[in-house]
């Protein structure tokens, strides 16, 4: 063992508190007596067809009764920035909601329906209760019925052992009485740590579902809200994804050519062409080192500035009226990520120079 | 077949067989680990079967503690129990220390609103008084070795209470060691016996690597009955000491990261230019400027041996003084922290010992960086091409 690792070990081995963190075994085989099947509840499932920039994706949702009225429920982040929304039942029946209400604090949206019935919400989910996640039957990538148990209970979320994936997000999580105990929301990979060695938390992915416990719903003028905040959320998400693509390319080396699958942001598309030209010229013509470095550094600075401008725009939006705390938090997190990306890119440019 | 081909074949078979051995060893290890985990889970199931009550019977007393502070969000665990006839929300001091906002919600979904904060005089425990009529678990000091226990809390800060089972491994005057696999986020979880009584609060994990390179992990819970408690003005106390606690903790974490980066490559840039500790921030800026200067020399073109030696000497001197500067930032911080720690009378025993431990760690790190700086005496950044 070298001196460094010995020192680190000394530091780490001093009584380590269970510092609060900053994010069981699956029992996903069908329980022998789950009392109903997907077919028997299909009428209460729904699909949300979301079109953005001419491309349509299909997401899961479901119909539940709240305060005596039927609502179509799904995750908010699916629909933010959408240019068109369409709702269908698994049988292809068109559903026509009449209004939109956003959860103030969570990634949930409900659309009021004019008629019909839906699932009943469970009163108090219990630890160990058998559940089923009825996922997206139209997607080949995911299972349509995933069984498990509740293995974690919180005020706002429950944890289940049913191993649903991203495509099932928005699906209902039902108990054996066909009641909704939550909505399939996100999976979280456990961070491995020496204290988790040999425990159920090592190399573990945990599945979480939002509960419908004291949710505050806020009616919005969807068209206006989406134009104002939804579009900003969507374009920031695309920008962030692309910047991560650039940073990943750069981690292979500064002279890597950068590719995006599709780039709706014209400024970013222009930057991409210009940057790849700088790289190609350096490789092809062996331009002077100083000139190349200067061009490269300037290119990085332009990308950093794109991120900073978007971050500023988001910061301004977070100060505006009409935001829900959930969206405000999402936009603030995007702004922070873009600021951090701008900082990393600037330093990368300087270091290359 | 020509001899060279035979040799090639032999080498290939050696490589293939060794990789097969490696693969077998890896998969054997994986299988053994899987079997060990399955055995543990089976044992846990047997222990759970001995409990006549379930998680659902106590979910109203289990608390998810969510904190927001300068370092972002964090969460831990807590529980509601009666001590000396009064109901309190118990958690660890380190869960709430330094937080700007704290919320307490039970696993069943109710918000808990404590009326104040009292700190244990020596151990890492806080109790927050609740309304007298609040229903609560009972606390007991009847503990014997090997009794079954349950730990219900917010494992990994997932925002949900989970159920873990185990046994009491050993008993001390103020703490017990248990076998339930609690992890980060479980801090503040109740440790319950078969009679639904709290016998401890899950507080910390220790680990070490033995001679066989195996990790040995031990989990400890503090007992609640032997402590003296002191009420504090939480806002004042937290502003004065809690923030300092978190800042120093983050400084030590960052310095450990810096050492990690620097040790791999002496001319590495250090990512601490926006660190909340001003000394570390300005050191990082100066250090990175120096590294930029070094890298700009790459464009200097050819030079003589004397010039190369001179440049390398300059780089060595700069790197060594950067190490000396960082080392003195650590030891200065340790000194001022120690002075503060010695003078303050209003701090809990837990914070005193934490600050003392921070000082020791800062001194160790300062010493290490100093030694590292000296080791750069023979470091040559530039070489002639062979």
Image: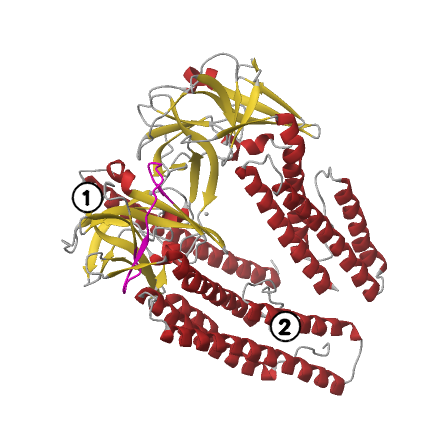
Classify residue A48 as left or right of residue A224.
left
* Mark 1 belongs to chain: B
Residue tagged 1: B196
Classify residue B220 as left or right of residue A97.
left
Q: Are marks 2 and 1 on the same chain?
A: yes
Vertical placement of B248 versus A212: above or below? Answer: below
Was residue B125 drawn as part of the magenta stretch in this picture?
A: yes
Q: Quadrant of the N terminus of chain B?
A: bottom right
Q: Residue B78, how many percent across, how many down?
A: 32, 48
Q: Identify which residue is drawn at 69% across, 77% down.
A: B382
- Which residue reaches farthest bottom? B306
Magenta-colored span: B104-126
Q: Quadrant of the C terminus of chain B?
A: bottom right
Q: Main secondary structure of the magenta part?
A: loop
Was residue B43 drawn as part of the magenta stretch in this picture?
A: no
Q: Which mark is residue A298?
A: none
Tell me, yes or no, if residue A222 can be seen here. Answer: yes
Residue tagged 2: B287
* Gap in angstroms between the C-alphas marked 2 and 1: 57 Å
Q: Identify which residue is drawn at 43% across, 34% down.
A: A209
Q: Nearer the viewer, residue B223 or B19?
A: B223
Vertical placement of B117 versus B42: above or below? Answer: below
């Amino acid at each position: 063992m070298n001196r460094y690792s010995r020192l680190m070990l000394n530091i780490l081995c001093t009584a380590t508190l269970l510092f609060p963190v900053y994010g069981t075994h699956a029992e996903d085989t069908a329980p022998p007596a789950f009392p109903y099947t997907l077919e028997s509840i299909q009428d209460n499932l729904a699909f949300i067809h979301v079109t953005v920039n001419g491309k349509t994706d299909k997401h899961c949702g479901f119909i539940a009764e709240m305060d005596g009225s039927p609502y179509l429920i799904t995750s908010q982040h699916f629909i933010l920035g959408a240019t068109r929304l369409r709702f269908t039942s698994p049988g292809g029946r068109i559903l026509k909601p009449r209004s939109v209400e956003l959860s103030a604090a969570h990634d949930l949206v409900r659309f009021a329906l004019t008629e019909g019935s839906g699932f009943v919400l469970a009163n108090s989910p219990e630890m160990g209760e058998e559940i089923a996640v009825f996922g997206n039957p139209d997607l080949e990538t995911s299972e349509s019925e995933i069984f498990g148990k509740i293995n974690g209970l919180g005020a706002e979320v429950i944890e289940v052992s049913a191993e649903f994936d991203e495509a099932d997000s928005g699906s209902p999580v039902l108990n054996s009485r066909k009641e909704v105990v939550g909505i399939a929301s996100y999976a979280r990979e456990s961070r491995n740590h020496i204290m988790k060695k040999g425990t159920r938390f090592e190399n573990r992915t945990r599945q979480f579902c939002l509960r419908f416990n004291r949710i505050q719903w806020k009616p919005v003028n969807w068209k206006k809200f989406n134009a104002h905040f939804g579009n900003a959320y969507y374009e920031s998400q695309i920008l962030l994804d692309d910047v991560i693509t650039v940073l990943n390319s750069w981690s292979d080396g500064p002279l890597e050519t950068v590719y995006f699958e599709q780039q709706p942001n014209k400024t970013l598309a222009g930057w991409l062409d210009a940057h790849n030209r700088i790289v190609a010229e350096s490789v092809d013509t062996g331009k002077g080192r100083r000139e190349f470095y200067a061009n490269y550094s300037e290119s990085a600075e332009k990308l950093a500035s794109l991120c900073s401008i978007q971050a500023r725009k988001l910061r301004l939006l977070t100060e505006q009226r009409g935001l829900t705390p959930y969206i405000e938090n999402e936009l603030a997190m995007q702004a922070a990520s873009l600021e951090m990306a701008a900082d990393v890119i600037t330093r990368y440019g300087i270091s290359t120079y | 077949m020509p001899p060279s081909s035979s040799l090639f074949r032999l080498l290939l078979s050696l490589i293939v067989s060794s990789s097969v051995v490696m693969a077998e060893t890896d998969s054997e290890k994986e299988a053994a680990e899987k079997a060990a985990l399955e055995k543990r889970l089976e044992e846990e199931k047997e222990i759970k079967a001995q409990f006549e009550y379930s998680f659902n019977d106590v979910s109203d007393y289990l608390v998810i503690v969510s904190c927001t502070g300068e370092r972002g969000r964090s969460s831990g665990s807590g529980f509601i129990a009666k001590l000396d006839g009064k109901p309190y929300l118990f958690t660890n001091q380190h869960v709430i220390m330094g937080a700007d906002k704290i919320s307490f919600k039970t696993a069943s979904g109710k918000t808990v609103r404590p009326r104040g904060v009292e700190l244990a005089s020596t151990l890492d425990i806080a109790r927050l008084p609740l309304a007298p009529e609040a229903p609560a678990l009972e606390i007991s000091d009847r503990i014997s070795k090997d009794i079954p226990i349950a730990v219900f809390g917010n494992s990994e800060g997932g925002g949900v209470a989970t159920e873990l089972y185990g046994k009491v491994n050993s008993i001390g005057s103020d703490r017990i060691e248990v076998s339930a696999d609690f992890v980060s986020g479980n801090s503040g979880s109740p440790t319950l016996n078969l009679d639904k009584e709290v016998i401890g609060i899950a507080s910390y994990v220790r680990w070490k690597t033995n001679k066989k390179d195996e990790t040995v992990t031990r989990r400890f819970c503090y007992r609640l009955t032997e402590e003296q408690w002191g009420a504090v003005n939480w806002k004042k106390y937290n502003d004065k000491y809690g923030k300092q606690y978190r800042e120093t903790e983050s400084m030590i974490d960052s310095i450990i990261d810096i050492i990690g980066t620097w040790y791999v490559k002496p001319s590495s840039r250090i990512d601490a230019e926006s660190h909340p500790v001003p000394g570390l921030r300005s050191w990082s800026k100066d250090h990175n400027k120096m590294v930029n200067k070094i890298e700009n020399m790459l464009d200097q073109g050819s030079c003589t041996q004397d010039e190369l030696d001179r440049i390398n000497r300059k780089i060595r001197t700069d790197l060594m003084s950067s190490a000396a500067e960082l080392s003195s930032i650590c030891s200065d911080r340790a000194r001022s922290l120690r002075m503060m720690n010695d003078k303050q009378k209003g701090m809990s025993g837990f914070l005193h010992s934490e600050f003392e431990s921070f000082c020791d760690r800062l001194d160790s790190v300062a010493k290490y960086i100093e030694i590292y700086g000296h080791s750069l005496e023979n470091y040559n950044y530039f070489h002639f091409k062979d």
